[in-house]
Amino acid sequence: RKEVEQDPGPFNVPEGATVAFNCTYSNSASQSFFWYRQDCRKEPKLLMSVYSSGNEDGRFTAQLNRASQYISLLIRDSKLSDSATYLCVVKEETGYALNFGKGTSLLVTP
Amino acid sequence: GAVVSQHPSRVICKSGTSVKIECRSLDFQATTMFWYRQFPKKSLMLMATSNEGSKATYEQGVEKDKFLINHASLTLSTLTVTSAHPEDSSFYICSARPGTGLNQPQHFGDGTRLSIL
C-alpha cells in the first residue's frame, strides 16, 4: 500500500503560536488531498481540502507541492480547542478509498 | 450537510461472539461505503470497500470470512465481525461519499469501539 508519512509529534505550543505540519506521500499519481482532524477516541472530521494553489480557511492554510509530493498545514493564532491529531489524507488515482497518515498530535497549552 | 450514522458506538462482548455494526447514509445515497479500522495510536487502515448490490472488496490481509460485509441498499452497509476475539478489539469506522467528483471528501460515521473480553 502506498505510504503517507507524517511526523507524529507531539507538538506542544502555547496559545497564540503558529504551528506547521508536514506530510509526504509516495504515490505521484495521487488525485486528492485532505487534512482531517481527529479528537481522542472520535471519528476523523474533514478540516480542509488541499489544492496546488493553496487553500486558506480562517486561521488554517493548506498547501500542496505536487513536484515534491509534499503537503503542509499551517495553523495561526493557535487556540486551546485546536488540540487534536491532524491526519494527512491522500486519495489514490483509482477508486475512492482514502490513505491516511498516522497523524500529528498537537497540544496547545495556556 | 452529508451525514453518516454508525451504530452501535460501543460494544463490549465475550470472546466468540459475532458483532454487527451498521453504517447508514442519512441524507444521500452511497453506492460505495468504506470500512476502516484503527488500533490505538495507529492510523486508520482501510479494511474493505462495500459496494451496493455486489461483493465487497477486501484489502490485503483482511479475512473476508471473518469480516462479513453486506451492502443491501444505497443507504446501509453492515460489517459483521464473526467469532470475535480480543485481537479484534479496535475502533471501527465507516465512511461514504455523497458525490462522484474526484475531490469529494468522505464523511465518516461516529465509529464503533469494539472491546472483546
Image (cartoon, coloured by chain):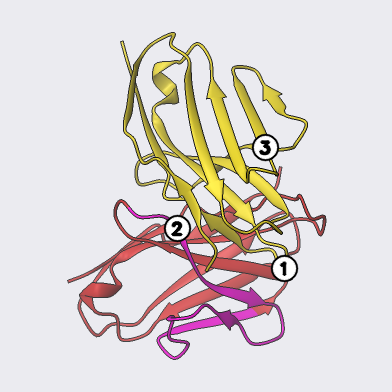
Q: Residue at x 31, y 10 (%)?
A: A110
- The amino acid type, in three-letter code, at marker 2 is Leu
Relative image position of residue A88 (x, y in whole percent): 53, 44
The residue tagged 1 is A94
Q: Nearer the viewer, residue B58 or A94?
A: A94
- The amino acid type, in three-letter code, at marker 1 is Thr
Q: Residues within 10 Å of mark 1 (few under 14, many from 20)?
A: few
Give the label, 3 or 2, closer to the camera. Answer: 3
Position of A55 relative to A78 (above/below): below
The residues colored magenta run B42-71
| Chain identifier of the residue bearing label 1 in the image | A
Which circle's residue, 3 or 1, is located before the other in the chain?
3
**Label 1 secondary element:** loop
Relative image position of residue B105 (x, y in whole percent): 69, 49
Dot label at residue B31: none
Position of A5 relative to B113 (above/below): above
- What whole-number distance in Å separates the C-alpha atoms at marks 3 and 2? 22 Å
| Chain identifier of the residue bearing label 3 in the image | A
Chain coloured yellow in this rendering? A
Residue B51 forms part of the magenta stretch: yes
The residue tagged 2 is B44
Say whether marks 3 and 1 touch (CB < 8 Å).
no
Classify the position of the N terminus of chain B by image quarter: top right
- What whole-number distance in Å separates the C-alpha atoms at marks 3 and 1? 20 Å
Chain coloured red in this rendering? B
| Chain identifier of the residue bearing label 2 in the image | B
**Label 2 secondary element:** loop
Q: Residue at x 64, y 50 (%)?
A: B3
Circle count: 3
